[in-house]
Amino acid sequence: MGDLSFLNSRFYKLMQHFSALHSNIKLVKYEKLVAQPEQQIKELVSFCNLEWQAQCIDFHLNTAPVSTASKVQVRQPLNNKAIGRWKAFKPHTDKAVEYLLKQGISIE
C-alpha cells in the first residue's frame, strides 16, 4: 500500500503542477461530475472549444462499438456507486490515508 500511496501522491502533485503551468489541462473531480453532470460536462466541452450537444449527457445511450476493458461501464449512466467504496477496506487503508493527508492531499 505504501508504494501505491507514494505513486498516487506523486501523480496528484504532478497534475497540480502541470495544471498551474498550462492552461490546456482541466482537472475534474468525479464526485463533482456525478453531483452536477450537466454543468460539469458543459464546462469540459467548453474547455475543449467544442459545441455543446445534449448527447454528451446521454453518452451511455450511444450505440457505437466500444472495444475497451470498460465497455460495460461505458453503457451505464454516470453514478456514484464507487464513491467512498474504499472506506469498506478500513483499517487496511489507514496507512495510505495517513500518508496522503501528510502530503496535503484531501481524500474526501
Image (cartoon, helix red, strand yellow):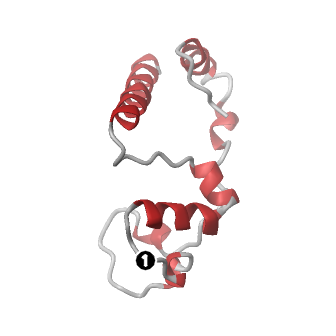
Up/down of 62 relative to 44, above or below: below
- Closer-to-camera residue (26/76): 26
Task: Name the residue beneath numbered marker 1.
Answer: 51
Q: Residues within 10 Å of mark 1 (few under 14, many from 20)?
A: few
Q: Image point 40% across, 63% down: which residue?
A: 70
Residue 97 drawn at (x, y percent): 60, 21
Q: Image point 55% across, 73% down: which residue?
A: 76
Up/down of 71 relative to 10, above or below: below
Q: Is residue 49 left or right of residue 39?
A: left
Residue 24 drawn at (x, y percent): 34, 48
Residue 105 drawn at (x, y percent): 56, 24
Q: Is residue 79 left or right of residue 69?
A: right
How many labels, in total?
A: 1
Residue type at the position of mark 1: Glu
Farthest left residue in view:
67
Up/down of 78 relative to 25, above or below: below
Farthest bottom residue in view:
63
Farthest top residue in view:
102
Q: Element at badge 1? A: loop
Q: Image point 45% across, 67% down: which residue?
A: 45
- Examine the rendering and report whether any part of residue 82 can be seen: no
Q: Image point 62% across, 69% down: which residue?
A: 38
